[in-house]
Image (spheres, rainbow, N blue to C red):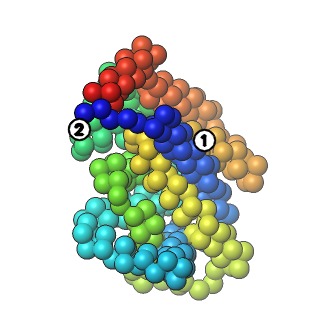
Amino acid sequence: MTTTARPGARMEGRQLGRVLAASGMFAVSLDSLLTRAADTSGVRVAFWFGLWMALTIGVVNAVMVKRSGRAADGLLQQARSMPGPLAQAAVTQAISSTLFVLAVKNTTVANVVVIIAAAPVLAAIASRVLIGERTTRRVWIAIAASIAGIVIVMSGSFGGGGIVGDLLAVGAITGWSLNLIVYRRHPTINRMAAVGGGGAIIALVMFAVLLGTSEPLSGVPFSTHAYLFLMGAVTAPLARVMIATAASYLPAAEVSLFGPIETLAATLWAWLAFAEEPPAATFVGGAIVIAAVIWGTRQPPGQRSVTSSAKSTTLSS
C-alpha cells in the first residue's frame, strides 16, 4: 500500500516549528529584562509571575469555553486520561521558570542566558536517556565543548558572589530540557493547560516560602507590578506556549538550537537598560557555547541527504 504525503507538508511543519521556536526564544528574552527591572526580591517576582501566568491562562481558557463550549470538556478529559504527563510538563516548567527568575536575581543576565544557551546539548542527553533518541558523536563533542564554555563563564563569578546564580541557571536549563522531553514523548499534551498549571505551582510554592519568611506580599511598587504583569500575563505564557508547540514539529535539541536568540537579545537588553557590561569570561565562554551548539546540532550535508532519501523511501513503500 502506497502512502501519499501532501507535497511540502513535512517541510511546512518544520518551518512552522522553527518560526515558533525562534519567536518563543525572542519573547522569553524579555523575561530577564523584566525580572531585573522588578524592584523586589526573586521570591516575590516568582510568586507574582506565576500567579499572573496562571490567571491569564485561566481567563483565555474561559473565553475559549464561552465561544466553543468544548474547551473545558477537552481539558478535563485530558486531565483524566493523562494526568501524569500533564503534571510532569507543569512541574518541569515550574522548576525551570522559578530557577530562571532566581538566577537573574543572583548573577548577571549575560551569565544566565549564556549558560541557558547550552540547553541543546543537555536536551540531547535527556532525549537519549529518557526516550531513546540516539546521540551522535558530533553531539557528544559539542557537549564537551559546551561544558568547557560554561565553566569559563562561571569562572568570572568565583569570589564575586554570582556563583549561586550561575548554579541556579544550570538547574533552570535542566528543568527546561526535561520539559521539552515531556512534550516530545507526549505530543498531545494541552500546552495551555501545562503552562497554566506550571504558573499555579510556582505561585503556590512561592506563597508557602513567603509565609515562612518575614517578607510580606504587600509593599511592591506599582512599576514593579506593571513589569510583573507584563511578564506573567503576556511575554512568559506566550513564549512558553510557542516553544512547547514547536516541540510538536521539531526534536528537542533542534528547538533548543534557537536558544542563542535569547542569549544575544537578553544580553543586549541588559546592556542597554542597565549598563550591565558582561565580563570578558562571559564573551569567551559564550562564544564557545554558541559555536558548539550550532555545530553540534547541525546535521552534516552528507547525512542530511541520506536521511532525506530514507524518508522518501519510507513514504513510497
Q: Secondary structure at mark 2?
A: loop
Asked if 150 appears above or below 298 in the picture, the reply is: below
Determine crowd level at label 2: few under 14, some 14-19, many 20+ residues with C-alpha closer than 10 A. Answer: few
| Residue positioned 43% across, 75% down in the render | 71
- State the image quarter where residue 249 is shown: top left
State which quarter of the image contains the N terminus. Answer: top left
| Residue positioned 23% across, 38% down in the render | 132
Horizontal and vertical percent position of residue 159 = 50, 45
Identified by mark 2, the residue type is Gly
**Comparing marks 2 and 1, which lies closer to the viewer?**
2
Identified by mark 1, the residue type is Ile
In the rendered image, which residue does mark 1 sit on? 261
Front position in the image: 35 or 253:
253
- State the image quarter where residue 37 is shown: bottom right
In the rendered image, which residue does mark 2 sit on? 132
73 left or right of 273? left
